């Protein structure tokens, strides 16, 4: 049996595909059987000898090291309530390695054509990088260019070069907006830090440090009736619904001031509120930098001794004070927060409740011009959007949120009783092109369509 050396950061599924091709195996079952025979575990089931253990065996790399270098498990189990003392890749729980060891961190297979060229020059072959598969990543961190992707993970069994012509590509304009978003960047660096970790952080610990930060910033830290600003609303505002649709679809169509346990629950639920993604979103929003977030996570000491942020609690700021700071800042949320010596997250919920939108968003630099054209110069919506060089629906959303109380009531009344949008079925993550092609309200995907890639991958030689 030929055992090629796994390349740096090569994802486990991609490496399995490489081993398949080198040994002429026709499918996963055949190569798994060959690997098990090779290391003398031919009589074991996958529960007794998971695929990751076989890969570790044939490469003679210790399984925990293999998992830390090639699996997305350290990210997916980065913050968990289930066996949080279990090191990533530990054979102490083979069932876990078998059922979720080699899963993907997001749907699809992503690659960067520039990294591919570089890899061909260095190693003579292109391969799938693990870091490109992290949720929400739309561009190559090294080359700052949009990632290419296939919707089906079956692509991992081929090389990126072979499937590149059939790949979809993240739209450049959309990528640029995300590249400039600081919280999205923090989200990626925290994800990378988790990917590099030896063992998970417990939900109890993560929740405690998040709760302290959230309380200091005036967020509601309990479930039930909504009495103060919600973390989920601040997350929607800071990250944007389009980007969120690719990682936590419930947030994409969430109504304002409506509690979403999947997100808000990170502050009060003792079991994992949802996936690790919710915790990383909260960490990115509530901590100024990746370093402070990771230091807080790593400080496994008594969390009650964790320093509470010195920022002013939002409740202590009077409404008049908030409006005058907003006016002085010409509608910039971040400058308003600076003037009031508080945080962005603390004031954005209150300003939005008052129908005062963020006019200086990095994502839409021309928004202020568009708003002035609409309200002051009384131009039409389409003309005003053209003046500010923003999409019509962006301006439309702003106009709606400016009349927040009545908008909320109307939106609630128009909510369908069942079917799409009623929240009665589980939404799926959208792929970048699906979000990009949505021009109206961001509808989440409820059922998978026939994946065109399955057919295309089958056509490519393995
Ligand atoms: Zn690259």
Image (spheres, helix red, strand yellow):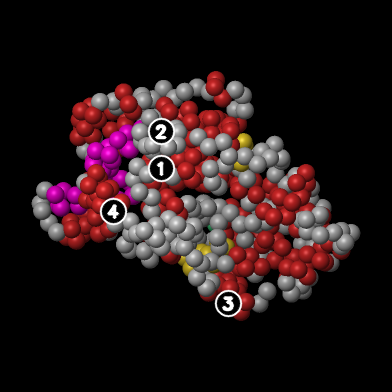
Q: Is label 3 within 8 A of ligand 1 (CB to nearest ligand atom)?
A: no
Q: Which residue is mark 3?
A: 455
Q: Nearer the viewer, mark 1 or mark 3?
A: 1
Q: Secondary structure at mark 2?
A: loop
**Structural distance between the alpha carbons of marks 4 and 2:** 25 Å
Q: Disc 2 or 3, which lies upstream in sequence?
A: 2
Which residue is outermost to the top?
305
**Structural distance between the alpha carbons of marks 4 and 3:** 43 Å
Q: Which residue is mark 4?
A: 413
- Give how far across and how far down residue 411 sits, in percent: 29, 53
- Give how far across and how far down residue 3 sits, in percent: 80, 62
313 and 116: which is toward the camera: 313
On whether residue 361 falls in the magenta region, the answer is yes
Tell me the quadrant of ligand 1: bottom right
The region drawn magenta spans 346-375
Q: Which residue is mark 1?
A: 259
Q: Disc 1 or 2, which lies upstream in sequence?
A: 2
Q: Which residue is mark 2?
A: 220
**Structural distance between the alpha carbons of marks 4 and 1:** 17 Å
């Amino acid at each position: 049996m030929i055992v090629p050396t796994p390349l740096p950061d090569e994802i486990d599924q991609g490496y399995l595909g490489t081993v398949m091709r080198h040994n002429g195996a026709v499918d996963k079952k055949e190569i798994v059987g060959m690997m098990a025979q090779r290391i003398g575990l031919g009589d074991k089931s996958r529960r007794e000898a998971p695929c990751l253990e076989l890969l570790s065996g044939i490469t003679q790399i210790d399984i925990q090291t293999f998992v830390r270098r090639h699996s997305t498990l350290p990210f997916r189990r980065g913050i968990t309530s289930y066996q949080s003392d279990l090191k990533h890749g530990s054979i102490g729980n083979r069932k876990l390695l078998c059922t979720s060891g080699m899963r993907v961190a997001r749907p699809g297979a992503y690659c960067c054509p520039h990294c591919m060229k570089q890899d061909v020059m260095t190693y003579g072959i292109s391969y799938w990088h693990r870091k490109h598969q992290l949720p929400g990543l739309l561009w190559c961190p090294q080359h700052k260019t949009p990632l290419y992707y296939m919707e089906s993970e079956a692509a991992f069994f081929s090389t990126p070069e072979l499937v590149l012509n059939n790949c979809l590509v993240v739209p450049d304009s959309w990528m640029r907006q995300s590249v400039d978003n600081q919280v999205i960047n923090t989200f990626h660096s925290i994800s990378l830090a988790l990917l590099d970790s030896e063992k998970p952080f417990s939900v109890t610990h993560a929740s405690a440090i998040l709760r302290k930060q959230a309380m200091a910033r005036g967020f509601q830290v309990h479930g039930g009736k909504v009495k103060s600003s919600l973390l989920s609303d601040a997350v929607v505002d800071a990250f944007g619904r389009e980007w969120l649709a690719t990682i936590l679809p419930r947030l994409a169509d969430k109504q304002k001031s409506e509690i979403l346990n999947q997100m808000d629950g990170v502050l009060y639920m003792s079991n994992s509120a949802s996936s690790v993604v919710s915790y990383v979103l909260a960490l990115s929003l509530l901590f100024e930098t990746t370093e402070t977030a990771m230091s807080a996570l790593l400080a496994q000491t008594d969390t009650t001794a964790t320093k509470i942020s010195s920022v002013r609690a939002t409740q202590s700021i009077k409404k008049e004070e908030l409006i005058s700071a907003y006016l002085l800042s010409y509608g910039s949320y971040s400058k308003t927060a600076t003037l009031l010596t508080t945080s962005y997250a603390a004031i954005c919920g209150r300003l939005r409740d008052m129908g005062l939108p963020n006019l200086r968003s990095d994502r839409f630099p021309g928004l202020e011009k568009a708003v002035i054209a609409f309200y002051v110069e009384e131009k039409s919506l389409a003309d005003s959007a053209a003046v500010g060089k923003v999409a019509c629906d962006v301006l439309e959303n702003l106009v709606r949120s400016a009349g927040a109380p009545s908008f909320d009531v109307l939106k609630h009344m128009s909510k369908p009783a069942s079917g799409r949008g009623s929240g009665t079925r589980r939404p799926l993550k959208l792929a970048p092109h699906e979000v990009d092609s949505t021009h109206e309200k961001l509808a989440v995907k409820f059922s998978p369509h026939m994946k065109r890639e399955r057919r295309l991958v089958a056509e490519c030689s393995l």
